[in-house]
Image (spheres, helix red, strand yellow):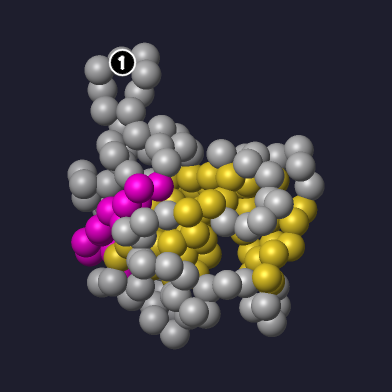
Amino acid sequence: GTVHQLALPSSVPNRFIQGLIVEKNHPNHAFVVFNGFSRRWTSDISAGEGHLFETTDSGATWTDISGDLPDAPGDDVILTASGKLVVATDIGVFISADHGVSWARFGTGLPNASTNDLQLSPDGSHIIAATHGRGLWTIPTP
C-alpha cells in the first residue's frame, strides 16, 4: 500500500490521534480515537467535540460516532470480527454493538482504570487490555 498524509477537516477535534485502525480487507474504512477532553478547561478555545471518528472514503470525510461515550481521553480502538467497536479510555474500556450510537462498560471484572492499549489475540478469540498500573487483562472477544 501507499501511505500519505491526510489534511483533516475542521470537523474533527483539535487534539492528537491516540489510536487508529483500518478495517481488514476494506482499506478505505478506518476509525480514529482522539485523546484529551472535548473542551479545554483553562481557556475559551474549544478542543472540539467527540472521541471516535470514522471514515469510509480513505479520510476524505469523517463522522463522529462517539454517541454517548463518556468525555474522557481515548487511548485505543479495535473492531471485532463481529463488527463491535471496543474503545480504551482513561476511565476504562467501552463497547458498542450499534456502531457507536450507544456505549456500555466492557468486561466483567476489568478495572475502571486508564487502559492504554487494546489488541486482539492472534486467533481473534480474546481481547488483551493493557492498563496503567493494573496489569494486563484478557477477555473473550464478544
| Residue at position x 67%, y 78% in the image | 125
| Residue at position x 76%, y 38% in the image | 133
Q: Please, what is the three-letter code of the amino acid marked with disc 1?
A: Ser
Q: Position of residue 128 (x, y in %)?
A: 69, 62
Outermost residue to the bottom: 25
Query: Is residue 75 toward the left or the right of residue 120 in the image?
Result: left
Q: How many marks?
A: 1
Q: Residues within 10 Å of mark 1 (few under 14, many from 20)?
A: few
What residue did someone put label 1 on?
A: 43
Nearest to the observer: residue 97 or residue 1: 97
Q: Which quadrant of the figure contains the C terminus?
A: bottom right
Query: Is residue 58 toward the left or the right of residue 73 in the image?
Result: left
- The answer to whether residue 19 is seen in the rendering is no
**Does 50 sit above or below residue 124?**
above
| Range covered by the magenta-colored residues | 58-69
The reply to whether the magenta stretch includes residue 62 is yes
Q: Position of residue 43 (x, y in %)?
A: 31, 15
Q: Secondary structure at mark 1?
A: loop
Query: Is residue 25 toward the left or the right of residue 47 in the image?
Result: right
- The answer to whether residue 49 is seen in the rendering is yes
| Residue at position x 39%, y 78% in the image | 27
**Does 108 sit above or below residue 98?**
above
